[in-house]
Each structure stands twice: as C-alpha cells, then as structure tokens.
Amino acid sequence: MRQHLKRLFSDSAVFAIATMGNKLVSAMLFPLYGLYLTSQGELADWGLTNTITLILTYLCILGTDAAMAFYFYDAKDVTERRLYFTNAVLFSGGLCLGLTLLITLVREPLTSLVYEKPHGYEFLLPVAFLATFGAILIQHILGYARYSRRVWLFNLFSMSYVIGSSLLSFWFLAEWNAGVMGLFYGQLVGQLLVAAILLVVFRNEFVWKFSPRHLKDLVRYGAPLLPTLMAFWVMSSVSRPILYHLDSIHNADIYEACMRLASIIVLITSPFQLAWRPFSMSIKDREDAPGLYSVIGRGLLVAGTLAIMLLTFFMQDIYALFTSNRQDLAEGYLYVWALSLGTLFNVLVNVFGVGLLIKKQTKLISRGFLIAAILYLAGNLLFVPVFHIWGAAGSTVAAYLFVIVWVYRQNQNHYPIPFKFGSVSAYLAVFLIAMAVVSWAQANRLDFLWAVEAAALGVTVAAVFATGLFSVRSLNRVGSLLPKLGGKG
C-alpha cells in the first residue's frame, strides 16, 4: 500500500510541474502584455473573449474528458479504449468546428453585441474559437497521456502549448502591434501547431471509426457534469461581462489585472490540491482521521489567510510591478486580497467536505456550488452597478463562504469531523473586518498605514487563540501528530 501511495504522491508532484510552470510563465508575461495593451478596454476585451471561449470549451467537451478518465480503465481491451478516445476527440473537435463556422457567419452582428468598441474585432471570435479547437484536441490527447502515465510527455506538451502560445502572442503584440487580435493569433498558431504534433505522436492510439454506442456512453457519463462546470464558470468568469456592460470598461480593465494577479495563489494551492485527495483517502480508516482532518483544515485556513494579509501589506508595490506601473490601473491592488481569498476558500471546500468524498456524496458538493453560482450571479447584478469592483470582489467572498458553510453542514450529517466551526466562523469574521479596515486605510492613504496594518495582523493572530481555533498547547501537539501519518496506513 505504501508503494502505491508513494507513486500517487510522486505523480502528483510531477504533474504539478506543468501546472505551476504554466501559471508562473503566464504571470511573468502579463506585465509585458500590459505594455502593449494600452488602449482603454483592451484588457477587458481580452478577458471577455476568454470568458466566452471557456463556455465554448465546456459545451464542446461536455464532460467527455471526465468520462475518458473512467472508460480508460473500464474498457475491456485496448481497442475499445481507443474507440472511446477517438470518439471523444471526434465529438468535441467536430462540435467546436461547427460552432466556429456558425460564429464566422454571424460575426459582425455578434461582435457589435459583445464588444463596446467592435472596430477591428470582426474576426476576433472566429479566431478565438478556432484556437479553442486546438486547445480541445490538446486537452483530450494530454488527458489520455496522463491516464497512460506518460508523465514527462504530458509535462512537455502542456508547457509547450501554454508557454509557446503565450510567447507567440507577445510576438504578435510587439512586432505586429496587433492588440487583442494579436493575443489570439498567438494562441491560434501555437495551439493548432501543438495539436497537430500530438495527433502525429498519438496516431497509433486512434481508431478512425465513429461508434454511436461508445459516444453515447461518454456523453451519458459526462453530460450530467455540465451544470457543475457551468457553476464554476459563473463563479470564475461572470463578473467580467457584468463589469464590462453594467459598470465601465475602465473598471473591467482593472478587474482583469486583479484576477490575473490573484490567480497566482494557485502556485501555492495547486500542490496541496493534487496531494490532498490521495492523502485524505489513505488515512480515512484511521481512528484519529477526523482529528487530523480538523487540524489540517484549520491550519490551512490560518496559514492561507495570514499569507494573504501579509501579501496585502506589500500588494501596492507588487501590483505596480505586475501592471508595469500603469496609472490607469493603479487602484487595482485594493481588490486582490478578496479575489485571492476566493481561491483559498475553493481549496478549503475540499477539506471541510472530505467526509462527503469518503461517503461518495459528491452530488451534495455540486448542489452547493450550483446554489452559490446563483447567489454569485445575483450579487454581481445587484452590487456591481452600485459598488463597482467591490461588488464583484464581495460577491466572490460571500459565494465561497456559502459553499464552505453548505459543505460543512452536509459533511457533518455523513461524516462528523470536529472542525470547531464556531471558532472558524469567529476567526473569519475577525479576519474580514481586519482586512476591510486595512483596505480602507490603504484607499485613503493614511499616514499611519503601517500602524493600522500592524494592528490588523496582531488582532488576527490573537483571534487564532482567542476564538479557540487553536491553543498554544494544541500547536505543540500538531508536530507530534503529523509524523505518525507515515507509520500507519
């Protein structure tokens, strides 16, 4: 058993190389993009187009990538496995090409509807959709590589298509001065090129035969996942078009920069997410498992929130560097902490709902996200026109807080864990109040800002112990608890 766990953790760490490398390069290139996307609305137009192509990806794949993860191992032989793989690629790729053709035919009225300044964007959506076609092929083929445990091939091509497309996009920006169109020209060339290479590399894995039965199996398994995927899309993307159309293009530009910077927290949370599932399942039969889950959940909450607070103290300088010190985007540093907190909360859902995963009650998690997505959409529609970017940032925090509370309550019905949720709630209330005060002080450029930040940090650290979330004695016990994990299976 220990050998299998070691392999699982090893694979997770190796697969994380591509994820973290891609995120890091994207973060490093964003300031360079900002040097050339100087006209008002270009950042927002870029984000809005990505939002649309993300929906396209979900609709075209229709959960067949998740279905392949099942049928790769469930297929009775290699030939049937290849039939599933081929039909997944044909279905998703064919659907994307069909929608690309449709968008091309109606591009002019659609462009005028989507963008405030559509001049020069007549072929933006067709180019973005065709680039997405390449990305869909890559996603399916690399998924197949991952299931086959072709680890380094997966990493090589994952990083090639993301980093290569990003560099090509920058070249189109810098050399052709092509603006937003240049970003998607780079994606188009990079992603179609990598997709073509992968088709050649994996040519022996395809069985060029359409099979209605195998396609029906894939869609029947994958289609029920679409509502959950759409919920994730709402909570990660819908603020962009709402800010763009109901508030101002200027604020949509700022929000796009904030989202790009806030997403870097994935560099910290991604390894934990990859390791958490196998780790949590490996100790589920231990008598002390609930206590260990509790310690890890509360520890991650404290470590994550304190890290976000400390980064916020230096965020103005970090954000200025990230946006190439553009004055039209300068205020964006105020909102990064709230958007980063949403990412942290999304990770915490997996910990506070670990019992639902153990008891195979994942539908309850999906239901919570669906409700949260509706609340998030309503919050944006109501508060963005009034509070602008704070309306979107506040809706992010509130929606993910709802998911955590929902998942925690459902978890306790199926697999009780002593998370000390009263203490968790009290600590979060103190943290959010402290961050609100820090944001107010930063926005008003108080002369004694350093004192406000020091007081906020002191109060938040004190709240860890005052709320009963942890005690000094319990912290001393954590060090003795965790080493035992390697001694029992």
Image: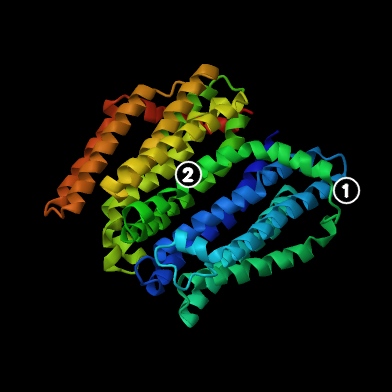
- Element marked by disc 1: helix
- The amino acid on which the numbered mark 2 sits, given as a three-letter code, is Val
| Residue tagged 1 | 79
Q: Measured from the top left, where is residue 384 in percent x and y?
A: 32, 47
| Quarter occupied by residue 193 | bottom right
**Residue in the picture at 36% in, 72% down:** 38
The one nearer the camera, 217 or 358, is 217
Q: Is residue 130 left or right of residue 141?
A: left
- The tally of labels here is 2
Separation of residues labelled 1 and 2 (CA atoms): 38 Å
**Residue in the picture at 62% in, 38% down:** 225
**Residue in the picture at 20% in, 43% down:** 437
In the current view of this chain or complex, which residue is farthest to the bottom?
A: 175
Label 2 crowd (10 A; few <14 / some 14-19 / many >=20): many
In the current view of this chain or complex, which residue is farthest to the left?
A: 447
The one nearer the camera, 338 or 242, is 242
- Element marked by disc 2: helix
Label 1 crowd (10 A; few <14 / some 14-19 / many >=20): few
| Quarter occupied by residue 250 | bottom left
| Residue tagged 2 | 234
Q: Measured from the top left, where is residue 353 in percent x and y?
A: 51, 29
Look at the numbered discs 1 and 2 and tell me whether their residues touch, using CB distance below 8 Å: no
**Which of the two discs, 1 and 2, sits closer to the camera?**
2
Where is the C terminus found, in terms of image quarters? top right
The one nearer the camera, 157 or 238, is 238
**Looking at the image, is mark 1 or mark 2 earlier in the sequence?**
1
The one nearer the camera, 425 or 253, is 253
Q: Is residue 130 above or below residue 281?
A: below
